[in-house]
Amino acid sequence: MLKTDGVTIRFGGLVAVNKVSIHVRKGQITGLIGPNGAGKTTFFNCISGVYKPSEGHVVFDGKNIEGMRPHKVNAAGMARTYQVINLFRKMTVQENIMVGMHSRLKSNFWSDLLRLPNQRKEEKFVREETEKWMEFVGLQDMRDHEAGSLSYGKQRLLEIVRGLASEPKLILLDEPVAGMNSKEKEEFDALLRRILNLGVTILMIEHDMKLVMGVCDYVYCLEHGSLLAEGVPEVVQNNPDVIAAYLGGDE
Amino acid sequence: MKNKKLSGNLLKCLVAVVVALLVPVLLGGSSYMCLVACFVTIYTISASGLDVLYGYSGQISMGHAAFYAIGGYGAGLLSEYLGIPLFISMFIAAAIAALIGALLAFPASKLKFHFLSLATIAFGEIIYQIVTNSPGRITGNYNGFFHSKLDIFGLKLDNNIKFYYFGLVCVVLFLIAKTMIVRSRTGRAFIAIRENTQAAEGMGVNVRKYKIIAFAVSAFFVAFAGSMYLGLVGYLHPDMYLQKQSVLFVTMMLFGGSASLAGPIIGAISIEILLEGLRTFEEYQMLIYGILLLIVIVAMPGGIVGAVKNIKAGILRRRAQKLDKEV
């Protein structure tokens, strides 16, 4: 599904990400862990087109996508959420999801202006489709609430369905349970399973080890921009380097 | 619930249109008052156009007087030198302005808020210089530009009441167009860019493309309004296109309330009436704009429309609290 090959990102002299190669397999949940400042989010930004890698390749669904603009990456079938919640705060829950559908829709300026029959049909489809997504995460009673007024956990959920609304092949989740309460966290496992059942592959950055170890099929651990370890969760969890990186053990 | 709200809005619009139709009667057919009403129609279209750009897409322009000039002079020159009837050249001039707006937005779409406002100020200055130092003096430079008033295929709009009704038709058409654009995939892309450019791009919105569209649409609105001015007054002077005209548009939009249908209308009406009332203090115009802008920015960021909404929400909340207490 997604393969990176020796991806390196430099900002001036600083190497933020150093020769990282990962492989996200179709239909799996792949985890990306690592201490703060390890370069996980930078790496995500590179995959989703925000940054262009200084070296290396990103291959998504058989196509080279490094250096593609974010909106093109989205249209190619990759959606994402953000570490810092990046909703359209003044838009309603429903409108946020509508924007998420943007790349699937065909109406253009002229058909919007003149309300051509195709456009009307499409807008009807958009409304029905957004209903489906609001139900998917239980936000249907809040359709007209401004996104910025939701609780933190609900905002996370909205970000995820906004991403899913583009019907991606792969979704990148950047710390999806940060800010959720314990009940929401508990329900999150099940939500991830339901996302997989939609045929969407997941790549997830997460600090919550219980969640990562419980749901991920494969885990990569980054430290100081380099891959420290990889493997199934049990293996990574017991890797002495990983333990040292997390607990700050001696070099 | 949703339908109720929709028909409620439709009702409000109908009431507004009926009131607008009666305006000349209410003003007792006074020619001067009707002229003021004509200016309100022109400014409503201008402020609404700027609203598409600022209110919805979050892109500031402090140089929209340039498009106002392109509309006025463009329509006038096309009609004067190519013999195209003014009514048709108005649309051509607006289309040219839209094209220029798109060309301006192409590089400007990379600029963030304050740099964009500087770039648009510079653009306004460029157009002003062209108008005052035109090749072959085709714009009449500082003497101004004269043109016969608007007639639509022989129907002469030779008094202010007639022009007012023409202006009203234009307002209704432009506001319908604005609503159609704003409540659609295109409009959602605009708002998404305003709310969070990074996320909009991540959701597949081609940010540059939509910024260009927003610039072009707003240029079309403002330029058409500029050409209406020529049709109404029959005379243009370069000093109408100084920086303060751009500030006037911004003031009207912000004072009424941006990102709304009613805001620019309310802004155009209230500021125009205020300016006419204070004609004798014309040298203090910039001071008045400045004070109004400060009031809006500091005390009521949503303009009049936003303030009314807040008051309504406050009343509802208090009523809900009262009910809670009673129960």
Image (spheres, rainbow, N blue to C red):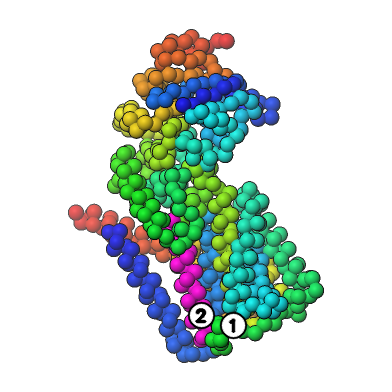
Per the rendering, the mark at residue B109 is none
Q: Measure the C-alpha gap from mark 1 to mark 2.
A: 10 Å
Q: Residue at x 40, y 75 (%)?
A: B16
- Return the residue at label 2: B166
- Magenta stretch, residue numbers: B161-184
- Return the residue at label 1: B150
- The reply to whether residue B266 is in sight is no
Q: Quadrant of the C terminus of chain A?
A: top right
Callout 1 and callout 2 share a chain: yes
Which mark is first along the chain, 2 or 1? 1
Q: Residues within 10 Å of mark 2 (few under 14, many from 20)?
A: some
- Residue kind at label 1, given as amino acid type: Leu
Q: Position of residue A144 (x, y in %)?
A: 35, 52
Magenta stretch: dominant secondary structure:
helix
Question: Cβ–Cβ below 8 Å for labels 1 and 2?
Answer: yes
- Residue kind at label 2, given as amino acid type: Phe
Q: Residue at x 36, y 54 (%)?
A: A121
Q: From the viewer's perspective, is A86 left or right of B134?
A: left
Is B25 situated above or below A65? below
Is B150 situated above or below A89? below
- The chain identifier of the residue carrying mark 2 reads B
Q: Position of residue A94 (x, y in %)?
A: 37, 48
Q: Residue at x 39, y 24 (%)?
A: A28
Q: Please state which of residues B131 and B303 is positioned toward the viewer in this rendering.
A: B131
